[in-house]
Amino acid sequence: MIKYIVILLDDTSTSFCHYANSKTVQRPMPLQTLKDGIRYAMKENLNIQFVYPEYTLPKEYLEVIDSIDHTDIKPFGVSNKIGSTTLCGSDIVVFNTLEEAVDSQVRSDTTYVVRTDKACLFAGCDALGTILGKVARLNVVITDVQTFTEDDFESYKSLLGRLSEKVERLYVSGRSPQLNLLTDRLLLDQMNNCGAGETTITLAPDGRFYVCPAFYQSAGGYAVGDLEHGLDIKNQQLYRLDHAPVCRNCDAWQCRRCVWINRLTTLEVNTPSHEQCVVAHLERNQAMKLLKRLKTKGFGFDQEIKEIDYLDPFTIRREW
């Protein structure tokens, strides 16, 4: 059942996930489309997430946006003020490079997304650890995860080990850090993925619905309905966990299970790539080690994460 709607306020609205936005020409969502989108969300009882471009929106847009409860997702540095009044404050701030995040001031009450390629990620472990200690939550998104090699897997495993030590030190000091790569798995007891096409839908500036922003802002996407006629998701069951044979037999519950990467790499929205699976299991296994260490220090987690001897569930498919 759809619970959330992502509304892209412009063709150039920031990416907050794995895909790169290929659209470079500013084209704001028509104001009437924005109003109609909000009305649709209200009728369907959907939680709204607005995604902003890098420029400041006109006053009339900010006033319409501010008329409804919502979550704001903005690129770093965007200000939305009318006079001295700030409208549409940032709930989630997106850095498009790790370097940008390192050079910026951050707030302790805000969630930050850092989009980075693997090379910058592997070189920036210390920087990530520093940022983690200053913010409410840090989501790290690897923009080229589908290109990981065996050497990259080893580098990522080492990175996660170092980050887990930072997380452990923060816990011991009285903090409760949130890092999607490690701490989410400590608390989950079922899959908690992006939900594109199953619990979340996207409304683009053209007035049409898409499974997620990537299917509008990157090449090869397709619409799944519009505001006039409603949703029309073909084979919608394929976006559900119970129709994903690999994922439903997996306990890397923090995995994003990105349907865009799935389609890009395997041509099927319900089938993950080897790279996505291994990355998620490296995170899962490091979370398991972190959990054991925190428990020995007296932290009362109820969760248990068992030992496994594989990194890709597809390799044990005969055991399902």
Image (spheres, rainbow, N blue to C red):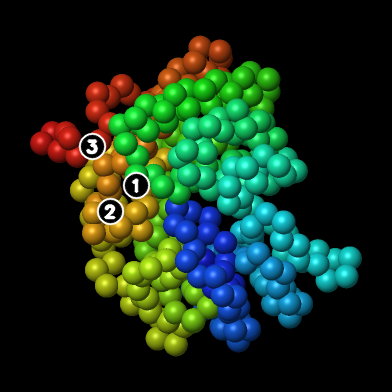
**Disc 2, SS:** helix
Closer mark to the observer between disc 1 and disc 3: 1
Compare marks 1 and 3 and give the one earlier in the sequence. 1
Q: CA distance from mark 1 to mark 2?
A: 7 Å
Count numbered badges in the picture: 3
User: What's the mark number on residue 313?
Assistant: 3
Q: Which residue is mark 1?
A: 146
Specify the amino acid type for callout 1. Gln
Q: Secondary structure at mark 1?
A: helix
Q: Nearer the viewer, residue 200 or 123?
A: 123
Assess whether mark 2 and mark 1 are in contact (beta carbons under 8 angstroms): yes
Farthest residue to the left: give it: 318
Residue visible at 68% across and 46% down in the picture: 110
Residue shown at the point (71%, 42%) measured from the top left: 103
Looking at the rendered image, the quarter that the C terminus falls into is top left
Image location (x, y in percent) of residue 285: 37, 26
Residue 283 lies, in percent from the top left, at: 41, 32
